[in-house]
Every structure is written in C-alpha cells, then in structure tokens.
Image (tube, helix red, strand yellow):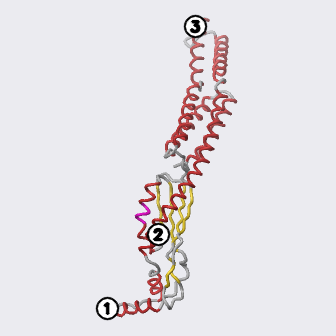
C-alpha cells in the first residue's frame, strides 16, 4: 500500500444548469456548485466546513464521507454556488417581492406589532430562493466524491516524496552506524589500557592501599583490570548501534507496508533519537561524537517529515 501525506489540496466543479429567475430580474440562476478541500497535518482527524446556507444540509453526509476515507489531518472543506456573489446580492424579481409582501401582510394582520421587513432581510430571503436546494445538495455530495479522489491522489504523491526522503536518510544513518562499528573495540581497548596505566602510576606514587596496607603487584593488576573493564562497559555503544539498526529495519518495513503508519513512525523516530543521544553521552572520542551529532541531525530531519505522514 502507498504512504499518504496529510498535506493535500483538491478542487472540483459541477457544470451546472441555468434557469430564469423571473421576468423582472433579468438574471439566470446557477445551479452548479464548486468545492475545494485542503488538508494539513494534525494528530487526529479535524474536519471544518465552510458552506453557504443553502448547502448546510449536506454537512452530515460530507462528514461521514470524509471520515470513512481520511484517518488523520486538519481538513477544511469549502463549497460555494457557482455564479453567486456573496458581496453583490441578486436583484429580486417582482414575483419574489409580491410573495414577500403577501406574507408580510398576513403576518401583520395577526401580529400588528410585528416590524416590517427591512431591505437587508428582503435581499437575504430572496437570495435563498436561487436554485433548487435539494438538487444542489445532491450535486454537492456527488462532487465531494470527485474532490476526495483528487485529495487522495495529492496526498499519495506527497507521501511518495516523503517516503523517498526517509529512505535516503535511512541509508545515511546506516552508513554512519557502519562507520561507528569498527571504532568500538578500538576505543574500549584504548580506554582500558589508559585506565590501567593511570592506576599503575597512582600505585607507584602511593605504594599503599586506602587502608594503608601494602598492595601486591598482582592485587593491583587484578583491581586495575576490573575497574578498566567496568569503565569499558560504560563507554561501549555496541548495544545502542544494535538497537538503532533494529529501528531502521522496522522503519523500512513500515514504509514498504504503507497505509496508516504515521504514529508508529513517530514513535520509532523518538527511539532513534534516544539511541543517538546515548551514543553521544557515552562517546570518548571526537570521531564518535561527530557521528552521533550527524545522526541526530538526520533523525531530526526525519522527525519533521514524519509529522506529515498519515
């Protein structure tokens, strides 16, 4: 399966059809609709809808449709009716005005204290009569399938790019781990010998143990060897390199598997950083420190990109 990014954009438009608004308006009503879907990364699925009043009835169906296909991401859905301007209202026709006057007279006959309709209210009420709401809703839901397919393709293309970048960083990390591997026995042997030399120097200068008793050469060598071995174990990073290799293998497996892998990748990136950081703290040479720093730079680059994977 493919790797999907949470970042994507898609838009879709219906061809629409026109019908005369009235003999007085001189304008046609557009029944076509347009839609765009934007998505960015998020820990969970967060859906936001910006729909005109005539299309608000489609929100439950759109929410169900997107929830079935998308698992993570902050997704914004915006729809509009083609040809309708939100800033310039449609000129109401005579028939529309006659209907409103009749309704107003009926209401005020029963409720004399009711306020008369304002110009803004008249324009708002007549604007809602554009098109067939039921037909527009059906068109928008059908259009959402097209837009969602486009969004999925965009997220797949971005996911492919992210996967290629992660594979490149994995290769570089493996190379750094390979460079560090032969340094381990050399560093352990050097530190052990350095510790023994310093121990012998200290014994030669003092000649006695902590309690003032004479210390034989054999006892001193045994103690020096024990302390040197314990110190060598503390600076040995072979275990960290083994775990790091295991994490790299698991990340490669997940990238080949695809689908919903973002959260697992995020956890593995944290583990990679932990191992590289431990290597740096144990390091007793400039070369191993440099390798640890280079690893952490690559891992941080991977962390930034993994945040965008679904």
Stretch in magenta: 59-63
Q: Is residue 94 magenta?
A: no
Front one among 18 and 175: 18
Q: Is residue 222 left or right of residue 106?
A: right
Mark 3 is surrounded, within 10 Å at the Cα level, by few (under 14), some (14 to 19) or many (20 or more) other residues, namely few
Check disc 3 and report its element: helix, strand or loop. helix
Q: Real-space Cα distance between discs 3 and 1?
A: 111 Å
- Return the residue at label 2: 139
**Of the residues under marks 2 and 1, which one precedes in the sequence?**
1
Check disc 2 and report its element: helix, strand or loop. helix
- Marks 3 & 2, CB-CB < 8 Å contact: no
Q: Nearer the viewer, mark 2 or mark 1?
A: 2
Front one among 209 and 6: 6
Front one among 194 and 73: 73
Q: Is residue 79 left or right of residue 203?
A: left
- Return the residue at label 1: 111
Check disc 1 and report its element: helix, strand or loop. loop
Q: Real-space Cα distance between discs 2 and 1?
A: 40 Å
Q: Nearer the viewer, mark 3 or mark 2?
A: 2
- Which residue shows up at 63% across the image and 9% down it? 207
């Amino acid at each position: 399966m493919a790797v999907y990014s949470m970042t994507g954009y898609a838009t879709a438009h219906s061809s629409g059809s026109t019908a005369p608004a009235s003999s007085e308006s001189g304008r046609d009503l557009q029944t076509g609709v347009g839609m765009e879907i934007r998505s960015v990364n998020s820990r969970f699925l967060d859906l936001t809808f910006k729909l005109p009043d005539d299309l608000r009835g489609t929100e439950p169906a759109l929410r169900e449709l997107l929830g079935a296909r998308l698992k993570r991401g902050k997704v914004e859905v915006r729809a509009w009716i083609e040809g309708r301007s939100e800033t310039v209202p449609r000129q109401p026709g005579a028939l529309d005005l006659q209907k409103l006057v009749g309704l107003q007279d009926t209401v005020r006959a029963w409720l004399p204290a009711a306020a008369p309709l304002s110009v803004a209210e008249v324009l708002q009420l007549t604007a809602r009569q554009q098109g067939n709401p039921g037909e527009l809703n059906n068109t928008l839901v059908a259009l959402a399938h097209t837009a969602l397919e486009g969004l999925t393709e965009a997220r797949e293309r971005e996911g492919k790019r992210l996967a290629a970048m992660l594979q490149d960083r994995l290769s570089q990390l493996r190379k750094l781990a390979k460079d560090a591997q032969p340094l381990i026995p050399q560093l352990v042997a050097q530190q052990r010998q350095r510790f023994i030399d310093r121990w012998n120097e200290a014994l030669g200068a003092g000649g006695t143990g902590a309690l003032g008793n004479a210390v034989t050469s054999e006892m001193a060598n045994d103690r020096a060897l024990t302390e040197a071995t314990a110190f060598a174990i503390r600076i040995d990073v072979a275990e960290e390199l083994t775990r790091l290799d295991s994490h790299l293998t698991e990340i490669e497996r997940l990238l080949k598997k695809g689908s919903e892998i973002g959260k697992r990748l995020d956890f593995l990136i944290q583990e990679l950083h932990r191992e590289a950081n431990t290597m740096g703290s144990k390091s007793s040479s400039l070369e191993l420190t440099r390798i640890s720093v280079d690893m952490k730079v690559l891992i941080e680059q991977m962390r930034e990109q993994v945040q965008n994977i679904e």
